[in-house]
Amino acid sequence: MTGQLTYVPPLSIKCGCFEGSASEVPNCRSWLRMILCDYPGDVLWVAELCVTELASNALAHTRSSWIGGVVWVRVEFYPSMVRVVVRDNGSEKTPTVKDTDSDALGGRGLALVRSLASGFGHRGNVLGREVWFDLEGTPET
């Protein structure tokens, strides 16, 4: 048969849960740096930048910043890539990559993630949404 997708499960998964506060974004970044410490510096740098953007977006645009809200970060390890997933508490809004004016003060986060990552996407609804990015690479050790 042609055209069928084959599901490949991750080799391993690591998960972190962070309070729905902007002060927790650096903790998301530090946690991810620890999880990916064996990866090359360029992969680590892009991962930190992208998780900062996605966690910040989750807090700015979803219920994750409400009282009791949280942001989950999940790292899925595959043979030649890593996927980082940020899950929020949901919103009526759907994430969109905007074409922004070069002088705009905001709105570039998802475009930045899309341009740096080897893959990018989202799924979910008002109850919760996952936004992810993929980075090609393997641990150095």
Image (cartoon, grey):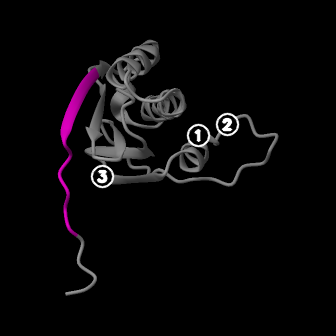
What secondary structure is found at the residue carrying circle 3? Answer: strand
**Coordinates of residue 24 in the picture (x, y in percent):** 40, 15
Q: Is residue 8 magenta?
A: yes
Q: Quadrant of residue 38?
A: top left
Gap in angstroms between the C-alphas marked 2 and 3: 24 Å
Q: Which label sits on residue 135?
A: none
Looking at the rendering, the stretch of residues picked out in magenta corresponds to: 6-17
Label 2 crowd (10 A; few <14 / some 14-19 / many >=20): few
Quarter of the image containing the N terminus?
bottom left
Residue found at the very far bottom of the displayed protein: 1
Local packing at callout 1 (Cα closer than 10 Å; few below 14, some 14-19, many 20+) is some
What's the amino acid at mark 1? Gly
Q: Which residue is mark 1?
A: 109
The residue type indicated by label 2 comes to Gly
Q: Is disc 3 in contact with disc 1, using a CB cutoff of under 8 Å? A: no
Question: Residue at horizontal 41%, vertical 46%?
Answer: 134
Q: What's the distance in space between the residues labelled 2 and 1, CA to CA?
A: 8 Å
Q: Assign a secondary structure to mark 1.
A: helix
Q: If you read the primary sequence from the N terminus, does the residue marked by circle 2 or circle 3 appear first?
A: 2
Q: Which mark is residue 106?
A: 2
Say whether residue 66 is left or right of residue 97. Answer: left
Q: Give the residue displayed 54% in from the left and 50% down from the top.
A: 114
Is residue 118 located in the magenta-colored stretch of the structure?
no
Question: In this picture, is 36 found above or below 110?
Answer: above
| Amino acid of disc 3 | Gly
Which residue is the extreme one toward the right? 103
Q: CA distance from mark 3 to mark 1?
A: 19 Å
Quadrant, the C terminus: top left
Can you say whether 120 is above or below 42 in the image? below
Q: Residue furthest front?
A: 141
Q: Are marks 2 and 1 in contact (CB under 8 Å)?
A: yes
Label annotation for residue 124: 3
